[in-house]
Image: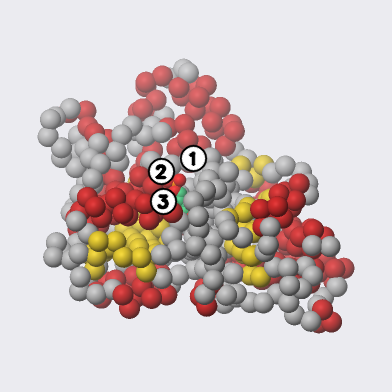
Amino acid sequence: MSEPTPTMAQPSLTGPSLTGPSLTGPSATRPSPGELARRAEALDAADELGKLRERFTLPEGVVYLDGNSLGALPAGVAATTADVVGRQWGELLIRSWDESGWWTAPERIGDKIAPLIGAAPGQVAVGDSTSVNLFKALVGAARLADPSRTRLLVDASTFPTDGYIAASAARMTGLTVEPVDPSQAAAAMGADTAVVLLNHVDYRTGRLHDLPALTAAARAAGAVMVWDLCHSAGALPVGLDENAVDLAVGCTYKYLNGGPGSPAYLYIAERHQTAFDSPLPGWNGHADPFAMTAQYVPATGAARARVGTPDILSMLALESSLDAWDGVSIEAVRAKSLALTDFFLECVAAYVPAGNVESVTPDEHARRGSQVSLRTANAREVMAELVARGVIGDFRAPDVLRFGFTPLYVGFADVERAARTLGHIFG
Ligand SMILES: *Cc1c(COP(=O)(O)O)cnc(C)c1O
């Protein structure tokens, strides 16, 4: 999996903000298996996004519920990659930097991602990992912030890399990191807050944070707001421009299906581009890279987020993968995602004997991303058994079964089979 399994100790998932709906309702009110299978069939027949599955190459007999960790392979990527290697590299050689559009790929592909995250063109540059882009964004944000401000607020339940990078960025810029529960983040923002970093969707619980309200709170406090979109981009509308977000980062190998280790992106709102001062001013972000001057002059626009030579092979695989989104509305994706997660919760309640699993994903649609996380004893073994039976999700320490629902290629029959298989494991 592209997203490595954390090996460090994780805080246990307790506390009121993590308590989801109980899945132990009385069995008398539950729909029967035959009824759920029939409902799944009807839902698939009525699903306008169902035909998009043809845009992906998926193995037979597998229910893939891990697209929030490594998206499935879009159908055109293999041929594009063969062309990039065989013809563009093999035959055109160095001419491809111009003739095959290699040089302009980071901004061109950024503009292809932009509509999926609610950004007008010219604000997204693709390249490097999410971790590296977090570093650029956080140090850049600290340099944009009022120098009298001292605090960097970070989501206390963040994906670990965000916390590690934030700690280093804070050391470099003289800020103090303050972990906050996202539900308390607005209240914690004050006159001494320089930067706020939050994950849009919590990777473990699937909780969706209120991007419009939290961004507005940061603006009201005079802080620079940085969002990590790894678990929301491609799964739900993000609305970066509409909500006047300052900076955002995200990866492309989860819901965007760019392939293992495909490059991440950095969004710099147009109003900040002139002042954005990257801590990694590599020659690719220079206004005139081939002038080879000793002095650094940043490029205008999102290109100043660039560092070194772009990773062309994975970048052009990503570009091809984004064709899977042609004509797809992210609002329709969101509607189907919620229908899939609702149906999964319903099937789990019907199929899994009471008391075995508990959802830690919010029941409320406005607080739910595109995954369902179920706590259970022996989660690692349970997931291994599910995978052995052809249902691929993943395990997150200490006790979470994580199921990602990717509306472009997951259908309702997949959901029903996954829950039924889980039910069989608990006997
Ligand atoms: C997946 C993920 C990352 C991954 O970072 P990489 O540098 O691409 O490995 C970072 N942050 C969050 C919130 C994630 O979900």
Residue at image point 34% right, 70% down:
215
Residue 161: mark in rendering = 3
Horizontal arrangement in the rendering, residue 46 relative to residue 285 (left or right): right
Q: Nearer the viewer, mark 1 or mark 3?
A: 3
Mark 3 Cβ and ligand 1 under 8 Å apart: yes
Q: Position of residue 149 (x, y in %)?
A: 18, 66
Q: Position of residue 123 (x, y in %)?
A: 32, 53
SS under mark 3: helix
| Quadrant including the N terminus | top right
Horizontal arrangement in the rendering, residue 285 relative to residue 36 (left or right): left
Mark 2 Cβ and ligand 1 under 8 Å apart: yes
**Earlier sequence position, callout 2 versus callout 1:** 2
**Earlier sequence position, callout 2 versus callout 3:** 2
Q: Are marks 1 and 3 in contact (CB under 8 Å)?
A: no
Which residue is tagged 2?
Answer: 129
SS under mark 1: loop
Mark 2–mark 1 distance (CA, rounded to whole Å): 8 Å
Q: Position of residue 241 (x, y in %)?
A: 35, 64
